[in-house]
Image (tube, rainbow, N blue to C red):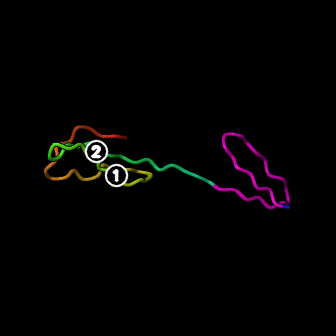
């Protein structure tokens, strides 16, 4: 017998000596820049990481803020 359970805020305990199948989702933080370039707003997206860093600012853009 195989236990297949979706864990969404509810704790489940698997049964000893039985197979258990599950899927794990995780979140990696990311840092983004909000810039204005040629009169247009852009979000320059960073790379998700356990230690996120701001992405490079485009040369002809003015930074308006950061998004953590």
* Among numbered discs 2 and 1, the one appearing first in the sequence: 2
Q: Find numbered disc 2 in the image and state the secondary structure of the residue it sits on.
A: strand
- Count of numbered circles in the view: 2
Q: Which residue is mark 1?
A: 46
Task: Tell me which residue sits at (23%, 42%) in the image.
Answer: 41
Residue appearing at x 81%, y 60% in the figure: 2
Residue 3 in the image: x percent, y percent? 80, 56
What is the magenta segment's predominant secondary structure? loop
Mark 2: give few (<14), some (14-19) or many (20+) Cα within 10 Å: many
Q: Are marks 2 and 1 in contact (CB under 8 Å)?
A: yes
Q: Is residue 5 left or right of 32 when viewed as pictured?
A: right
Q: Position of residue 66 (x, y in %)?
A: 30, 40
Q: Is residue 38 above or below residue 17?
A: above
Q: Quadrant of the C terminus?
A: top left
**Left or right, 63 with reference to 25:** left
Residue highlighted by disc 2: 33
> How many other residues sit within 10 Å of disc 1, few (<14), some (14-19) or many (≥20)?
some
- Which portion, as a residue range, is magenta? 2-23
| Mark 1 element type | loop
Task: Give the CA separation, mark 2 to mark 1.
Answer: 8 Å
Q: Is residue 3 above or below residue 64?
A: below
Q: Name the image quarter holding residue 23.
A: bottom right
Residue 40 is a magenta residue: no
């Amino acid at each position: 017998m195989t236990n297949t359970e979706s864990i969404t805020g509810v704790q489940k305990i698997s049964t000893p000596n039985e197979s258990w199948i599950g899927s794990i989702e995780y979140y990696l933080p990311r840092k983004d820049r909000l810039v204005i370039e040629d009169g247009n707003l852009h979000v320059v997206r960073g790379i998700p990481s356990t230690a996120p860093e701001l992405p490079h600012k485009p040369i002809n853009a003015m930074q308006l803020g950061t998004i953590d």
